[in-house]
Image: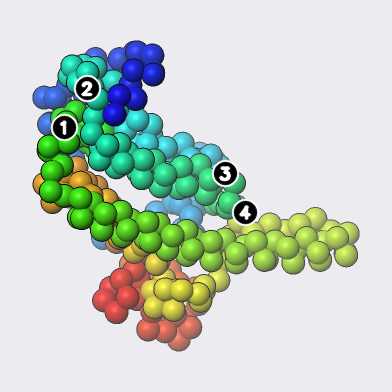
Amino acid sequence: MQLTRYVPDLPTVVPGWYPPTRENWELISYAWQFFPLLTAAQWLIDWYPQGKTSINSRFNIPGKWAWCLMEIPGMLTVLYCMLTIPRLEGLHAGLPWANWTMVFIYTIHYLYRAVLSPLVLNPSMSPIHPIVFTLAFGWQLMNGLSLGGWLAGYGPTTVYDWAGRLYTIEIGLVIWGWSLMGNIFHDDDLREIRRSALRRQKERAAAENKPVEGVDKLYMLPKNGLFHHVLFPHYFCEWLEWAGFWMVGGLNCAPARTFLVNEIATMLPRALAGRRWYVEKFGEERVGKRKAVIPGLI
């Protein structure tokens, strides 16, 4: 697919690195595999100044805009690589449809996660500390360069590289699609807690002529879907999404594998800490036998 011929030449932002040369991309992709070693601190402390565990700080960034700006660099980086690296590599025939399929589903996820979710759908979001913002921004940038380089010319570049993989691509897309819907469903169940509370507050405020209290720090135990079994099913569904994404790319797609592993490495300790938070707030009896993130296991 020769989509790049309809797009004007984009400037090089950082020579050799953005977009990366093949040698620098190989270095980035190799180093990115060791990210789980950096998550060790999350297993030792529960301090994470975002969301339900956010703290009061004069340095805090408003939650909605912080979330959008720290989550969107990965998507923009992948798209930038797709529109620059093929020209640098002399891929005048364009990239295979499977490459663009992976870019498309990756973009769909982050349009939902980084734009629609915080700016349109969420009634409120707790502020985010600059430390979390910076780490998440860097995470997305590294992941975008790793995936973007592979998809844009340093991985498969012809239809023959994808030969014989139609069925696994289709299965991966089905897993990705259903998991995305599960992710959205469980996200919306959390949103409905605040939406319904905000509606009641507005009705009461109108009747009593008082200001609306707000729902920034309102938390309850959700009960629908996989919330019957785990406290963070949206995490679990997202992992299944990227497992399907990896299946589309193939077992040899190291950037997709690293993406999945790094997501689990950073989200699993947060889910376990989140379960401890729920137990502290609502009590062991109310939390019950619900696991943190994987039904029946963790």
Which residue position holds label 1? 158
Q: Earlier in the sequence, mark 4 or mark 1?
A: 4
Determine the CA span between mark 2 and mark 4: 46 Å
Residue at which label 2 appears: 93
Circle 2 SS class:
loop
Q: Residue 232 at x, y = what percent?
A: 40, 66
Q: Secondary structure at mark 3?
A: helix
What amino acid is labelled 3 in the image? Leu
Q: How is the image coloured?
A: rainbow
Determine which residue is flagged by label 4: 123
Task: Name the N-terminal-most of marks 1 and 3.
Answer: 3
Q: Earlier in the sequence, mark 2 or mark 4?
A: 2
Q: CA distance from mark 2 to mark 3?
A: 38 Å
Evaluate if marks 1 and 3 touch, with contact meaning CB atoms under 8 Å apart. Answer: no
Q: Amino acid at mark 2?
A: Ala
Q: CA distance from mark 4 to mark 3?
A: 9 Å
Per the model, the C-alpha gap separating discs 1 and 3 is: 38 Å
Q: Is residue 72 left or right of residue 153?
A: right
For the C terminus, the image quarter is bottom left
In the image, which is nearer the foreground, mark 2 or mark 4?
Answer: 2
Using the image, determine if residue 95 lies above or below residue 167.
above
The reply to whether discs 2 and 1 touch (Cβ–Cβ < 8 Å) is yes
SS of the residue under disc 1? loop
Q: Which residue is mark 3?
A: 119
The crowd level at tag 1 (other Cα within 10 Å; few <14, some 14-19, many 20+) is some
**Residue at disc 4, secondary structure:** loop
Residue pictured at 46% horizontal, 52% vertical: 50
205, above or below 246, in the image: below
31 vs 227, nearest the viewer: 227
Measured in 3D between alpha carbons, the distance from the residue under mark 4 to the one under mark 1, in whole angstroms, is: 45 Å
